[in-house]
Every structure is written in structure tokens, then in C-alpha cells.
Image: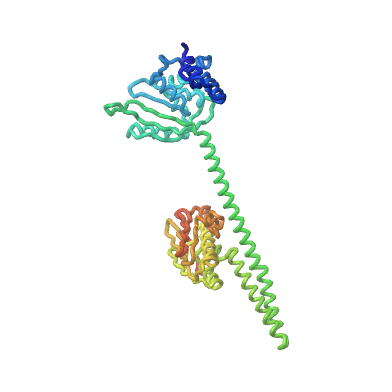
């Protein structure tokens, strides 16, 4: 009897499968019998042309070689083997080589140096060095490199190679797997290029912002400041020539003008302190800290080492000044303390900034996740764009901000006086 008939007979034993004595079971069970019979016809069907497309296995039991070949050829990667004691022609490369690189197995194996010839020129020296290191030490190789296909396209591979040893411990053959990661590599490259463009754009925006701040600061100082000063002098002259009954009104007007001049000067310094451009970071910070404490009532202890008579790259000086300025602004607005410390040190290689307060801290992760950055994003961005690093640690005992730069190639020596 045919296999499918035997299977169905085993699966169902006639009507007895759904009867009990002379009592016929409900119609629903008969329907279930028919459904199961249809399933059996599907799973135990006779051989078809589709079935014959697969290689026949003796006694329906595949050999270990056939199983391994089927498994290897289903892997979405190129598998290759090369023996130490046999010719290159006796090596193996899986048929995926043709789909990926356009070469047949025979073409690839008939040319011992084809693999090396098709490695991208940018990767040849590195690949040769890594292979030599593997053969010398016996350590596995894990690397990425590009190969030129038959059509001239560049295919990026992630390759895992290792040496397999025989029972006596001697090298037997090399086994490797090459995964096509071209799409992933292209995506990663595009992301890096996008990030680089965004970095350039961010820096450009900051540069434009600083230029605009400098222009507005000069406008406040040179134009509006001069007008206010002239108005103040005019009021003083009028006050001296007026009668005593009008002195109070003139005094109030003069006070308003004085307040306006003071506020205009503060805005000018906040926008872009001229001291930063002319005298450098230390002079600008000293002046800013004096004005900051008088305005906010927060006492700042300032320690500095290595800043005297020294200039840095203008971009770095601006970033450092803005980070200190923003951090102190946050302390005055949010910390609830009236004391803070600023510590800055510089040597030949590094510039380090630390701002600490003992006020009420905050959950940095929660604050950043909620978008309540309090200037943290801006400070971190300034540090990153100028080649530095930024970190913040905050809790119930206060907040500590740090920023660091490698300045070995940036710093220059120049004269400058403290303001």
C-alpha cells in the first residue's frame, strides 16, 4: 500500500474512529473527521513534480555531508574553507559567492589570488596585516573590509575567520564566514555624514549667534549708551539751572537714566563682553563674576590656575565663558543657594572647568528626558562642538558641572591684563 494510504489508515481507522457500537456520533464529529482527512491528504500526499525537485535521499535518511551542505547553503553569508595541507583548488566556498560578488564557485577557487585582488585598495594593507597576525598567533580574526564585485560595485563584509586544529593540535584548515553588511555600512556612513553636517551647522549657528550678539552689544554700548549719557548730562544741567521746586522731579529722572544706563551696560556685557575678545578668558570671567554677584547676591569663590597672561582659541574661550555664564545663571534661578564655586585649571594639554553649588539639586535624567534642560543641552552642545566633554552630577546635596578640553594644539601664549 502506498505511504500516504498507510498514513491515512493509521490516522483514521474507518468509521470506527467516530462511532461507538451501533450509536452514531454527532454530525460535528463527522465534520471533524472529514477535516482531519483533508489535512492528512495534504501532509501525506503522493510525490509530485515539486517534491521531485529535491534530491532523493537513500532510504529517506540524508547523509551528514548532505545535511551540512544544505545548512551552509541556507546561511545568508559566504562560507569558505581552506586547508593547510591541500591545494587551493581543493578549498571550498559556498554558492552565495555568485549572488553576492558575481563569481561562480569554480571561478573563485580556480584563481588562488582572486580574493586578494578584489579586496578594496583602501583595505588591502590592513587585511594583509590582520591575516598575518592570525596565522602568527592563531587568534581568531574579526574584521570589516570591502571587496570589489565582478560588476565593479563595492560590497562591504563583516568577516569572522579562525584556524581549526586537528586532534594533535596542529593547524588543520581555516574556516570563515563573510556577512554582507553593505546596506548597514551605507546607513552608518550616511548617519555619520549627517551628524557631521549637523555639527557644522550647529557650529555655524553658534558663530552667527555670537556675531549677532557682538553687533547688538556694540550697538547698545556705542549708540544707545551715548544717547543715554547725553540725556543724563542734559538733565544734570537742567537740574542745576532749575528752581528748588523742580529738583525732586529732576532727581527722579536722573535716577531713572542712571538705572537705564546700568541695565544697558549689563545687557551689553551679557550679550558679548568686549573683554573676552580683547583680554581673554580670565579677564572676562573676573569682570562677569563681579557683576554677577552684585546683581544676584550669590557669592562665588573663584580659583584658577594657568590662565594668567594666556589666550586660547577664540572658539574655546567663547565656549568656556558661555558654560560658566549659563551655569551661574542656573544657580541664581534654581538652586536656592547664595554660594557657589568656580574652579578652572589649564596646563599644556588640558583646560578643565568645574562649577559647584550646594543648593537643591535635580534628577538629571528625568529633567533631560522631560525636555526641562535648564541650559544643560546648550552647555553640552557648546562643549562638544568646541572639541570638549561635558558632564553634570546633581542630587540633594547640590550640583556639580564639569567641562574639559584637550588644548595641546589650540592654546597660544599672549599678553593680557586682568580687568
Q: Residue at x 56, y 72 (%)?
A: 295
Q: Relative to residue 143, is residue 240 drawn left or right?
A: right
Which residue in the rendered view is the most extreme toward the front? 22
Q: In the image, is residue 288 above or below residue 352? A: below
Q: Residue at x 55, y 71 (%)?
A: 296
Total labels: the figure holds 0
Q: Residue at x 28, y 26 (%)?
A: 167
Q: Is residue 39 visible?
A: no
Which residue in the rendered view is the most extreme toward the bottom? 244
Q: In the image, is residue 398 above or below residue 119? A: below
| Among the 4 quarters of the image, the one containing residue 172 | top left
Which residue in the rendered view is the most extreme toward the top? 1
Residue 37, percent from left and from top: 53, 20
Nearer to us in this view, 243 or 56:
56
Q: Is residue 26 visible?
A: yes
Nearer to us in this view, 139 or 4:
4
Residue 382, percent from left and from top: 53, 56
| Among the 4 quarters of the image, the one containing residue 64 | top left
Residue 147, percent from left and from top: 48, 30
Q: Residue at x 33, y 22 (%)?
A: 85
Nearer to us in this view, 354 or 310:
354
Residue 42, percent from left and from top: 53, 20
> How are the colours assigned in the image?
rainbow
Q: In the image, is residue 44 above or below residue 212? A: above
Q: In the image, is residue 63 above or below residue 229? A: above
Amino acid at each position: 500500500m502506498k505511504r500516504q494510504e498507510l498514513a491515512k489508515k493509521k490516522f483514521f481507522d474507518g468509521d470506527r474512529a467516530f462511532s461507538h457500537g451501533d450509536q452514531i456520533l454527532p454530525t460535528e464529529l463527522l465534520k471533524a473527521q472529514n477535516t482531519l482527512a483533508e489535512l492528512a491528504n495534504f501532509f501525506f500526499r503522493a510525490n509530485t513534480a515539486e517534491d521531485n525537485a529535491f534530491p532523493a535521499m537513500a532510504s529517506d535518511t540524508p547523509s551528514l555531508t548532505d545535511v551540512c551542505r544544505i545548512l551552509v547553503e541556507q546561511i545568508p553569508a559566504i562560507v569558505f574553507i581552506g586547508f593547510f595541507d591541500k591545494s587551493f583548488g581543493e578549498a571550498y566556498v559556498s554558492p552565495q559567492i555568485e549572488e553576492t560578488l558575481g563569481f561562480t564557485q569554480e571561478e573563485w577557487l580556480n584563481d588562488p589570488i582572486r580574493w586578494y585582488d578584489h579586496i578594496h585598495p583602501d583595505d588591502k594593507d590592513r587585511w594583509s596585516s590582520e591575516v598575518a597576525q592570525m596565522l602568527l598567533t592563531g587568534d581568531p580574526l574579526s574584521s570589516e573590509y570591502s571587496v570589489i564585485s565582478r560588476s565593479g560595485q563595492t560590497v562591504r563584509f563583516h568577516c569572522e575567520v579562525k584556524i581549526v586544529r586537528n586532534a594533535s593540535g596542529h593547524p588543520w584548515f581555516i574556516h570563515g564566514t563573510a556577512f554582507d553588511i553593505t546596506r548597514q555600512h551605507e546607513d552608518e556612513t550616511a548617519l555619520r555624514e549627517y551628524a557631521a553636517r549637523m555639527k557644522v551647522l550647529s557650529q555655524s549657528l553658534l558663530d552667527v549667534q555670537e556675531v549677532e550678539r557682538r553687533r547688538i552689544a556694540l550697538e547698545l554700548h556705542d549708540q544707545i549708551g551715548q544717547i543715554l549719557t547725553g540725556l543724563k548730562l542734559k538733565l544734570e544741567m537742567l537740574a542745576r539751572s532749575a528752581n528748588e521746586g523742580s529738583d525732586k522731579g529732576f532727581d527722579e529722572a536722573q535716577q531713572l537714566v542712571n538705572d537705564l544706563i546700568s541695565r544697558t551696560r549689563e545687557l551689553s556685557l551679557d550679550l558679548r563682553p568686549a573683554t573676552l575678545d580683547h583680554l581673554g578668558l580670565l579677564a572676562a570671567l573676573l569682570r562677569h563674576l563681579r557683576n554677577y554677584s552684585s546683581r544676584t547676591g550669590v557669592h562665588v569663590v573663584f580659583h584658577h590656575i594657568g590662565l594668567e597672561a594666556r589666550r586660547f582659541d577664540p572658539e574655546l574661550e567663547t565656549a568656556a565663558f558661555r558654560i560658566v555664564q549659563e551655569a551661574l545663571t542656573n544657580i541664581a534661578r534654581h538652586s536656592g543657594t547664595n554660594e557657589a564655586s568656580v574652579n578652572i585649571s589649564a596646563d599644556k594639554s588640558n583646560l578643565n572647568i568645574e562649577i559647584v553649588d550646594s543648593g537643591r539639586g535635580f534628577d538629571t535624567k528625568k529633567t533631560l528626558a522631560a525636555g526641562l534642560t535648564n541650559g544643560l543641552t546648550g552647555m553640552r552642545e557648546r562643549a562638544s562642538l568646541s572639541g570638549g566633554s561635558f558632564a553634570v552630577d546633581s542630587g540633594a546635596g547640590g550640583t556639580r558641572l564639569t567641562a574639559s578640553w584637550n588644548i595641546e594644539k589650540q592654546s597660544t601664549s599672549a599678553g593680557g591684563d586682568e580687568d
